[in-house]
Structure formats: structure tokens, C-alpha cells
Image: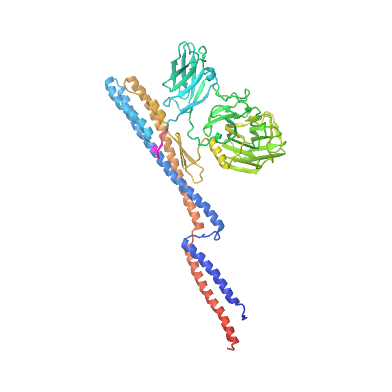
Amino acid sequence: MVLSIKTNISALGSLNNLDKNQAATQRTFARLSSGSRITTARDDASGLAISNNLRLDLASADSALSNIKQATAVLQIADSGLETIQAKINRMTELSAMAASSTLSNAERAHLDAEFQTLKDAITADTQRIRFNGENLLGERPEFALGPIGSDIETDDGVVGFQFDNDGLFQANDIFEFTYDSATNVFQIENTNTSYRESIQGPVGGIVDGKTFDLKFEKMGVDIKLSSEFDFATDIDPAVDDATFIIRANDPLAPGFTPNDLSNLVANISAEDGVVNVVGTGIQSVSDLEVTGGNNQATQGAAGARPTLDFGGIFGRDAIDFDGNDVLTIGNSGAINTSVHQQRTIAFNFETAGDVGSRQVIYEEGGGVNGINAYIQGGRLYMGVYRSNGANSSFTSVAIAANTQYTASFDFDSTTNTVRAYLNGVEFANQGGIGAALPSHSGGIALGGLNGSTRIHTGATISGGGNRFQGKVGDFLLYNDTFAAGDHANLNLHLRGAAAPATAGFSNEQMAFQIDHAQGTQLIYEKPQTDFMVVQLSSLNVLNIGNANIAADELRAATEFLSTERSKIGGLLSQLEFASNQVSTFKENTVNANSVLRDADMAKETTQVAADVLKSRVNVLTMRQALDAGNQLLRLLNGG
């Protein structure tokens, strides 16, 4: 043993061990007092990251379970309301059966009708009374407006106005045929979805120049205004003429954001309002996309290459349906392609068909030298911009599936030399641009195919009549501007025609509930359209045998409607039960997994703290012995 007057190696070693042991003891006490195995990131960095993700999953699961409970309450209230209405319908059916008996006088039937009318009024009240958190659960009749109309009943043909009674015999997206018989001077409209029709006599002697005449189809709830330009000498036959019109409801799901909220909108190609609109200074007009005949062909394009209208085709909104041979073209425009552009954004919704492998051009502007395009090839969506014969290009791509609906947006900004691309509102590319502004790129503009040529991501130029899109495009927006990520998210919502997903989204027509922990599954409750049923029942009475029989038929139809709607609700309740079980199981197992990572083993930690205390005592004793070595040195120096 070496005795030194400068350094006590043994004491320092004991002190070091004591410090380490005290630190370990502190961590053990922290785990014991908190009950958690991980008290700081140093305890288990990877375990902490995994546990935090599990905690997020648990929070989502708790929200989903809460939403499921809310949805269950909503559906049970709605079902109870329909059951109440059905009970009234049953009693009204009894009254109509009694009134149909020849043994009663009309005076006696009047007494039955008094109760009948009271029950009818009560049903009307029920449809407004059944609510959850202030929201009507049985559907509220929306405001209606005119949708696409046929080319033979436009303003130039003397049909200058449409007005719809909110209590009319129609629903949103009903298609009407307009007929005129010049021999009898009789007008008729027929709802092709319900086969309801109504006829009225036209004005004798026509309409005085400068004046108008209202065709009031009161039973149907439709008022059509004619001007003196109307040709009373010519028949209008929907079998021959393009003489249909569609009734639209104001979109209850549209968010506050609209495309025009963003500046520099220069093109809006949309089937939702029945026309292809191109707006902006200097842009050439594009033919209306109208309903013609019975096949809903678009007038734009040559025969055999005209896309059709698909009502409610993408996210419940109208779409332009391309069959692989169709194309819509737009002439060169200073606002789109014959000027220099520092910034550009395109945004659209689309649905793929069964083939996503072959090259299919969705949109292109320009030619082989400069331009922008979006196309499908090899199971991917490509969106890109190029200049100088492709010497400078920036193409983005993302995988897509067959028979699937998407939203997409793409922008480039020469001021920052960046290109960004989004699918369903989620950014998938943020990369370098083309190094300068996009030069003038005349050569044509097309939706659904090529209008000349374009350049693709490989650098090759493609041209000709092939490469046409097979699928649907609902809305296509083009801006001479770029936008923040939040605006791209808003574009996604607008193109989906819906407000942002929420715990419970309400509208006149449906309610949406997020019912899974992954935020991917929504249960949609389509509200029963009891408002239309009320309209159908509104004119019923049992004042005579004939009317009683009519009432019996309508009440039978109402019973069938209510039974169908209640069965739908029953199916949704079953779905909620399954979802609740699934989320509860997920939560249980996630809690267990998180417990393994987070929770301290109390027996293990108690044993460890006892060992730590013992080590500390031993360290103190050894330090005392090490310090006593100095005393031994003094005794040796003193001769002791």
C-alpha cells in the first residue's frame, strides 16, 4: 500500500462510487414516487417517443368513443322521432279506412277528417321538433335554385325565368321535362324522377311585345316566366328537343372558402353549375357544357369526342365524364398561356378509372417548348412545369389507385424557385422550380387530353389524339398566384364540396361522426327527407270515399318510406356498436402497451432502492477507511 500526502486514491474512488450510487438512488426514488419507468428522456429515449405516440392514439381513441356515444344518441333520437311519426301515420291509416266505408255520411267523414288534419299537422311539427343540440335530425327543406337547362329553353328561346316554391313536389337534383303543344296551347312539366306532371293553358293570343307571362305550375311548385320572344307556333318535345331543366339545392356542405377568395383566378372549369366557365380579362369564351337530349352530351368538342355530365359523380358533386376519347379545348389566352407568368397554381378533383397504367393527360397548356401539365402514367399522378424545350423542368409524382377519387393541387413560384404539390390536401413534393418565370407558351389548352403537344417528365414530347383521360373531373381551377399550405388545404375541402372534418359535422342533409382512432373513418347519417313526405301528405283529406282511398295509398307509401329510413338507422346503430367494440379493444391494448413502456415495476424498484441504500452505506464506510490512511501517515511521521 502506498501512502501519499498529495492524493488519497482510495478516498477519491469511494467518493466517485458514492456519487454514482446516489445518482442511481435518486432516479430510483423518482420512478418510485412517480410510478413511471421513464421520468426523463435519458431513461429511455426511444421508449419515450413510442409512448408519446401511443398516448396520442389513446387521446384519439377517447375522442372516437365520445363521438360514437354522441352518434348513438343522435340516431336513437332520430329513430324515436320516426317511430312517433309512424304511430300517427298508423292512426291516419285507420281514419282513412273508416272514411272509405260507404256506411258513413260526408258529415261523419268530416269529423274523421278533423282528427286526420290534426295528426297531419302534428307530423309536420314532429319533423321540426326532433333535434340534437339544436340541429334538426329529420332533414330540413333547403332553398332551391335552377341547375343546368336545355339549350332549347334558354333566354333566347323566350324562357326567361324560373322560380321554385319551397313546398313544391321536387327534391334536389330532380330533372324536369318541359313540353309545349302548339295545337292546344298547353304547357306541361314532368318530374322524371317521380313521374309527377302538371299541365296548364298558355296565354291566348301569345304575349304582348315587351311583356312577360308566368306559367304557374302550382301543384308542382314551379313558376316559369316567358317573354314575348317565345315561339307559340312551334312544339317543344323533350324526346326531340333539348328541353330539360334541373333543380338544385344550395350546397349545405360548402365551406366559407370559395375559389374566388384567392386572388388571380383565371379559369374555373366546373360541371357543378352546368357550364364551363373561363373568366378573366382577354380569355376566349368556351361553349356551355349543357344537358342535350337524353344522353347529357357536352356541346364542347367534335362529335364522338364530347364528355358527358355525371350528376353527383365526384364527392357528390357533378363531374365531367371522359371516356378515353373525349377532350375539352380552350383557345390561347393571355391570362393563361400567351404571357409570361411568375406564379401559377392548378387545383382539381378527379376520379380514376380502371386503368392508371397507361399515359392519360388530365390537363395541359403550351407545347413542347414551355408549358404545364398533369397526367397519369404507371400508376402515378404527374404534375409539372417546364421551359426551354424541357432544359429546365420540375415534375412531381405520387402513387394513385384505380377507381378512386382524389383532389390535387400544384403550384410553382419563380420568385422563390420552388414547386409544391399536394394530393388530398397533403403536401407530397416541395422542390426546386425551373429557375425563371414561365415564358409564353402558346399551343393550346386542353382538359382530358392534348390540344397539340406537351412535354413529360422523361423529357419526351408527346402529341396527337391519343393519351386521353379516362375518368372524371369535377372542378378545375387555375390561378396566376401561389398559396400557403393552409390555402391548399382549403382548396382540397372546396374540391371535396365539404366542410372540414369535425367531431360532428352538421348540414341540412347529413351529419358526419369520426368513429375510429385513426381519424380515417366517418359515419355518415343521411337525414331522412321527411320534409318531402310532409309535402306529399299536405293535400290529403278523408272528406269523401275517393279522397280517403287516395290518402290510404299515400299513407302506405309514407309507411314504406319510414320503414326504409328506420332500417338505415338500425344499420348505422349496429355499425356504431361494432366500432365501439373495435375502438375499446384498441384502447385496452394500447393502454397495456403504453404501460409496459411507461409504468415502473414497483417490486423491482423497491428491491433496487434497498440495494442502492446498502451500497451507499458501504461507500461511506470505505471512505472512512480511506480517510483513516492519512491518520496512519501522521502517526508514522510522529514516530508513533
Quadrant showing the C terminus: bottom right
Judging depth in this view, the residue of 472 and 205 nearest the camera is 205
Residue 635 lies in what quarter of the image? bottom right
- Outermost residue on the bottom side: it is 639
Judging depth in this view, the residue of 606 and 226 nearest the camera is 226
Horizontally, residue 438 falls left or right of residue 233, namely: right
Residue 179 at x, y = what percent? 49, 17
Residue 389 lies in what quarter of the image? top right
Residue 289 at x, y = what percent? 57, 25
Residue 377 at x, y = what percent? 65, 36
Horizontally, residue 624 falls left or right of residue 443, namely: left
Q: Is residue 177 visible?
A: yes
Question: Does residue 135 show up magenta in the picture?
Answer: yes
Question: Does residue 415 show up magenta in the picture?
Answer: no
Quadrant showing the N terminus: bottom right
Query: How many discs appear?
Result: 0
Q: State how the image is colored.
A: rainbow
Residue 261 at x, y = what percent? 55, 35
Q: Is residue 585 above or below residue 476?
A: below
Judging depth in this view, the residue of 634 and 107 nearest the camera is 634
Provide the residue span drawn in magenta.
131-139
Q: Residue at x 39, y 28 (%)?
A: 534
Q: Residue at x 29, y 22 (%)?
A: 110
Q: Is residue 604 visible?
A: no
Q: Is residue 566 above or below residue 601?
A: above
